[in-house]
Image: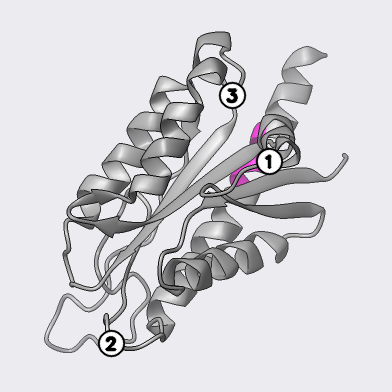
Amino acid sequence: MSDISIVIASYSGYGHTAQIATAVADGARSLAGTRVHRVDVGSLGDADWELLDAADAIVFGTPTYMGTASGAFHAFAEATSKRWSDRAWSDKLAAGFTNSGSMSGDKLHTLQYLSLLAAQHGMLWVSLNLLPGWNTTTSDPEDDNRLGFYLGAGAQSFNDTPAVHDADLRTARHLGRRVAEQTRIHRAGLAAAAR
């Protein structure tokens, strides 16, 4: 079977979300036969759109600003409307991640927005599939999925430091690996159905 292609389409205003995108990419690359590309949705060129169109899976990433995706990500979403009307991304796999300075920061709304964008395109959403961590008195803030998201990877990074929490980076790597695994399964299923 040929390599699978995953494109991470993200925007990062202050560098935190870029670090999470790197972790997602590392997780995806940990599955042999996975090619990963990253595109900055704030400055897309023709070659970036070609990567997106050719991808088996697209992972959307954006910081959460004022309770939703960044303005740059919203502009990208609107720019996909031609692909939406042509059904160009139909049946590709999709997933998402976001980051904010607050523990909640209304990140769930952003993940819902990303999954709805994927649904409008006819894409198949890949959830995080991690139980929540840091939810008992004996658990630890170093637990994977410490913020308890299911829809995608959510991270919290303090506004006054460039660091991203190690547990959130591990959770992002998990998401990347899961997307790669599910993409390989999906590709094999399509090949089997075509026989």
Q: Residue at x 64, y 47 (%)?
A: 7
Q: CA distance from mark 3 to mark 1?
A: 18 Å
Q: Position of residue 1 (x, y in %)?
A: 87, 39
Question: Do callouts 1 and 2 mark residues in contact (Cβ within 8 Å)?
Answer: no
In this view, 72 is above or below 120 = below
Query: Mark 2: which amino acid?
Result: Asp
Q: CA distance from mark 1 to mark 2?
A: 32 Å
Crowding around mark 1 (Cα neighbors within 10 Å: few <14, some 14 to 19, many 20+) is: few
Q: CA distance from mark 3 to mark 2?
A: 38 Å
**Residue 62 circle label:** none
The reply to whether the magenta stretch includes residue 98 is no
- Quarter of the image containing the C terminus? top right
Q: Earlier in the sequence, mark 1 or mark 2?
A: 1
Query: Mark 1: which amino acid?
Result: Gly
Question: Do callouts 3 and 1 mark residues in contact (Cβ within 8 Å)?
Answer: no
- Residue named by callout 1: 45
- Residue named by callout 2: 160
Secondary structure category for the residue under label 2? loop
In this view, 6 is above or below 54 = below
Q: Position of residue 101 (x, y in %)?
A: 24, 73
